[in-house]
Amino acid sequence: MNFMAHVRLGLVMLWWLWAASAQAHLMVAQKGTLNLQGEGAYMVVSLPVSAFQGVDDDGDGAWSVQELDLHGPQIHAQVAQQMRLRDSQGVRPIEGVTLIPTPPDDRPSDPVTQLVVMARFKLAHPVDSHATETVSGLHLQTGLFGQHTAEQQLSFTVTQGAHKQLMVLTPERAEQALFPPAWRVVTDFVQLGVHHIATGWDHLLFLAVVLLGGGSWRQILGILSAFTAGHALTLAWGLWGDLPFSSRWVEAGIAGSIVFMAAWEANRRHRQKQLPLRWRLLLVWVCAMVHGLGLASNLLALGLDPAHRLWSLLGFNLGVELGQCAVALAAAGLWVALSRRISANAMARLRSGCLAAAMFMGLVWMIERLL
């Protein structure tokens, strides 16, 4: 079967991959600060207008002056209901809410696309900004996420004197503890690592290509571990140093790694060459380093906390490994089920078609990211 026939066989994979995000690690615009001092927690945060319900009357994705005047009380009410700071005694009162409509930076006369919210939460107990220990028992929660993919993360910098925490809220993790202990950081980032693998289309496609290469379960486990090791190396580099790489080229490189690995596996199987396992491990490890750069270049958007660098890295990579193993088990179960129903020749054609489709999809992503 020639290459074009393989492509046609694998086109069915492209329909669901095409809808996936072409940029897996974009930085978000929504940012905020929460400063604990004395009897108050002072918040400043920029929110997308699409996070609010019943305000955008004409549905253009922005607020006009008329819409702001008409729905001002409704906007205040949604801020009070959806932006919460709570402790063991319940939700803390929010006071002095000030709303500052913000039009696009390059078009100040246009309708509002972001809303800056300034507010004060009244704390149950005064906070000493000079204390050596941070407060405990406080949780920040919000439901004000935008409707677009790039508006689904809200980054906060929490400070208490010299203490600082970076926090990222998402619809899946809409509530987080302020200054959590190390064990909580590990468990949180285990969940984040699993979620990253489950929703990272480029990582899932790369894993699929690697799994299509076949091998024993020990070889597959070794390959998955090599991917995690390479991923962790450049992620740690980003935690402890500055990366001199543009995210544009990194994202294109991630797509390119899919193209390269799929072509390499397809060529290896076409020539029926059994290369030593160490060569596969080395290639996966190198490609995984490129994938890790995509995370390391956007640490703030990912939510890795520099106050707990080692624990964050440990938990995240443990989550990545668990997520990869779950994907591998699911894929292996599906492949075994298919192999019992169709012939070996049909399975070989299916494998070739899937690799061809992966090459095509990776090439599409690479061109899209470069342009």
Image (cartoon, rainbow, N blue to C red):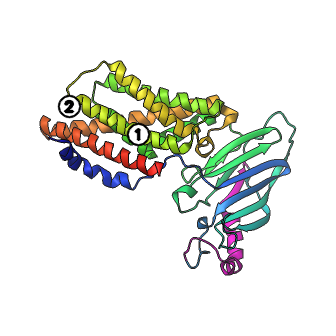
Q: Does 191 appear in magenta?
A: no
Magenta stretch? 59-88
Amino acid type at mark 1: Gly
Q: Does 87 appear in magenta?
A: yes
Q: Give the answer, above or below, for where 295 lies relative to 171.
A: above
Q: Position of residue 12 (x, y in %)?
A: 26, 52
Residue 51 seen in render: yes
Residue 222 seen in render: no
Q: Position of residue 295 (x, y in %)?
A: 54, 39
| Left or right position of 211 against 314 | left
Which residue lies under the disc numbered 1?
Answer: 256
Give the overall secondary structure of the magenta segment: helix
Q: Position of residue 313 (x, y in %)?
A: 58, 31
| Left or right position of 299 against 291 | right
| Left or right position of 129 against 328 | right
Amino acid type at mark 2: His
Q: Residue at image x 57%, y 29%? A: 314
Quarter of the image for the N terminus: give it: top left
